[in-house]
Amino acid sequence: MRTYRNSLKNLRDIALAYSQEKNPDLASLSRELGAIVHRDAQALADGLSDLRTHNRGFERWMLARRGRPGVSVLVMAWPPGYSSPSHDHAGLWGIEMSLYGALEVESWTRPSTSHPWQLRGRDWLGPGDATWFDADPPYMHRCRNLSRQETALTLHVYGGDLEDYATYEQVEAEPYWLSLPQRARIAGPLRL
């Protein structure tokens, strides 16, 4: 029987192995990670139950970090009904995958910073499902836990350390958004 610690180690090791190059194949990485999540969904849900039940709000937990080439692997806890502000990823590539629960991801792109954001679409992620984005062109999204009763858990792999990023508020009656600088807070390391 697989334990959630083995599953998390496998997810971490796969993410670190694929991110040895500057621009990894995000579709292949997502498939590999998704296979682990599908296979070990119950072990992950049971083993990470503390993150789902302590109800301290939205939290980021560090699973792994490497400097060169840069990569960070995080698990995030999304309280029932929680919706993030629209935000970018500071020019990093990234993968976001549901581990437990369901997430809606609404995304926007634009050709350059002088152009307005344009809605790209919506994705609905269940356990093992992923969405990803390249470092270029500019990208932002908003994520929402679809459950009103359960905390959702997600796995995030970014091509660097997402310390500083921006949130966006749409300017009334304009196609442009106001950018607000932010600093990511990590709740702590996720112990294996």
Image: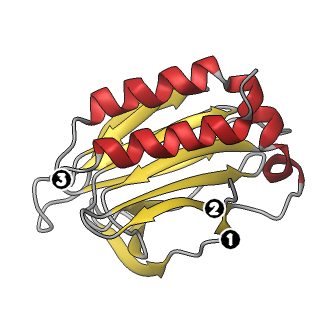
Question: 48 left or right of 24?
Answer: right
Question: 53 left or right of 182?
Answer: right
Residue positioned 72% across, 36% down in the render:
4
Question: 165 left or right of 77?
Answer: left
Residue beneath label 3, please? 110
Mark positioned earlier in the residue sequence (2 or 3): 2
Q: What's the CA distance linking mark 2 and mark 3? A: 30 Å
The one nearer the camera, 134 or 158, is 158
Q: Quick check: marks 3 and 1 in contact, CB under 8 Å?
A: no
Residue type pointed to by label 2: Trp
In the image, is residue 70 above or below residue 20?
A: below
Q: What's the CA distance linking mark 3 and mark 1? A: 32 Å
The one nearer the camera, 55 or 2, is 2
In the image, is residue 151 above or below residue 76?
A: above
Residue positioned 33% across, 44% down in the render:
17
Residue beneath label 2, please? 61
Question: 52 left or right of 7?
Answer: right
Residue positioned 81% across, 47% down in the render:
52
Residue positioned 43% across, 76% down in the render:
163
Q: What's the CA distance linking mark 1 and mark 2? A: 5 Å
Which of discs 3 and 1 lies nearer the camera? The answer is 1
Q: Quick check: marks 1 and 2 in contact, CB under 8 Å?
A: yes
Residue 83 image point, x, y percent? 62, 52
Residue 119 image point, x, y percent? 31, 43
Mark positioned earlier in the residue sequence (1 or 2): 2
Quarter residue 176 falls in: bottom left
Tell me, yes or no, if residue 50 can be seen here. Answer: yes
Residue type pointed to by label 1: Ala
Residue beneath label 1, please? 187
